[in-house]
Amino acid sequence: MDEHEPLRLAGRFAHVSEHPIARAVAAGAVERAGSLPLPENFEDVAGLGVQGVVDATRSSSAARSS
């Protein structure tokens, strides 16, 4: 895994999110890591995080519990 891989993964999910901070993460990921293909079967579960298929692997990003 190269140094940009975590940013690419987060950016792919952030790119399709409606959250303004996620949009900023996506913009930064594109700037640093290049184009970001969209995840398949994307789901945004309010308050819990997001999930989808990235490179044929189901992945998720959980919201931090406070």
Image (spheres, rainbow, N blue to C red):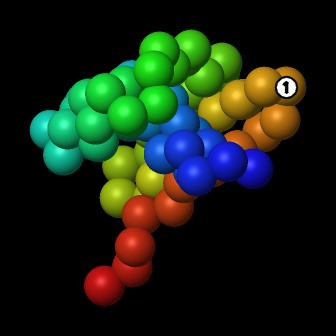
Identity of the residue drawn at 83% across and 35% down: 57
When the figure is inspected, residue 28 is found, relative to residue 39, above or below; the finding is below
Task: Check the image and name the residue furthest to the bottom.
Answer: 66
Using residue 19 as the reference point, say whether residue 40 is left or right of it: right
Q: Position of residue 51 (x, y in %)?
A: 60, 41
Task: Check the image and name the residue furthest to the left.
Answer: 20
| Residue type indicated by callout 1 | Ala
Crowding near the residue tagged with mark 1, few <14, some 14–19, many ≥20 C-alpha atoms within 10 Å: few
Quarter assignment of residue 61: bottom right
- Helix, strand or loop at label 1? It is loop
Quarter assignment of residue 4: top right
When the figure is inspected, residue 64 is found, relative to residue 31, above or below; the finding is below
Identity of the residue drawn at 85% across and 25% down: 56
Quarter holding the C terminus is bottom left
Tell me the residue that label 1 is attached to: 56
Identity of the residue drawn at 75% across and 50% down: 1
Is residue 19 visible in the rendered image? The answer is no
Q: Position of residue 23 (x, y in %)?
A: 23, 33
